[in-house]
Amino acid sequence: MQEGQKRKTSSLSILAIAGVEPYQEKAGEEYMNEAQLSHFRRILEAWRNQLMDEVDRTVTHMQDEAANFPDPVDRAAQEEEFSLELRNRDRERKLIKKIEKTLKKVEDEDFGYCESCGVEIGIRRLEARPTADLCIDCKTLAEIREKQMAG
């Protein structure tokens, strides 16, 4: 799958989770008006709820599946599975915190603007990545700096 298609699918799945269509901007519409903020609030809340449901399912699954296997290979396989699930849930927990931070920005009407330069991030970018806090130019520069520091 090509990168552009991958991003489009990701964006559509976030919108699908929320059960909303892509926002249709109207000519002359003010950026981050109440309708747009409401649109993103729905997306973020649905995404957070979906992630929290997954965390709950993991806890239930681990409690149900926890068994003391006499065979060391079976026990090791189960421990590896649990370890992988816990790492995934830890990433999701961090994402939930980022979603909560973004919802606070929506409530404060401080959402949709680049934290670095202050320009509008853009509706389409935010639909693809609702927790984005940098415009595409600043994000690109940050990634270049990160590569230079690591390289």
Image: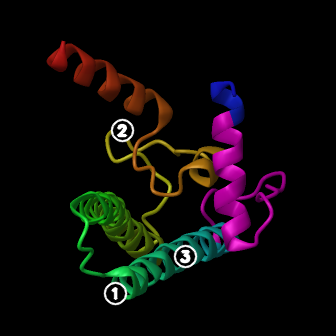
Name the front one of labels 3 and 2: 3
The location of residue 25, given as percent across then percent down, is 79, 55
The residue lying toward the viewer, choosing from 39 and 110, is 39
Q: Secondary structure at mark 2?
A: loop
Location of mark 3 (residue): 50
User: Which sits earlier in the primary sequence, circle 2 or circle 1?
Assistant: 1
Which residue is labeled 1 in the image?
63
**Number of the front mark, 2 or 1:** 1
Question: Which amino acid, mark 2?
Answer: Cys
Report crowding for label 1: few under 14, some 14 to 19, many 20 or more residues within 10 A (C-alpha).
few
Q: Secondary structure at mark 1?
A: helix
Residue 91 in the image: above or below residue 41: above
Count of picture labels = 3
Name the residue at 68% across, 57% down: 13
Between the residue at mark 3 and the residue at mark 2, the CA separation in whole angstroms equals 32 Å
Residue ID for mark 2: 117
User: Label 2 vs label 1: CA separation?
Assistant: 47 Å
Please, is residue 137 above or below residue 55 in the view?
Answer: above
Q: Classify mark 3: helix, strand or loop.
A: helix
Quadrant where the C terminus is found in the figure: top left
Identity, as a three-letter code, of the amino acid under mark 3: Gln
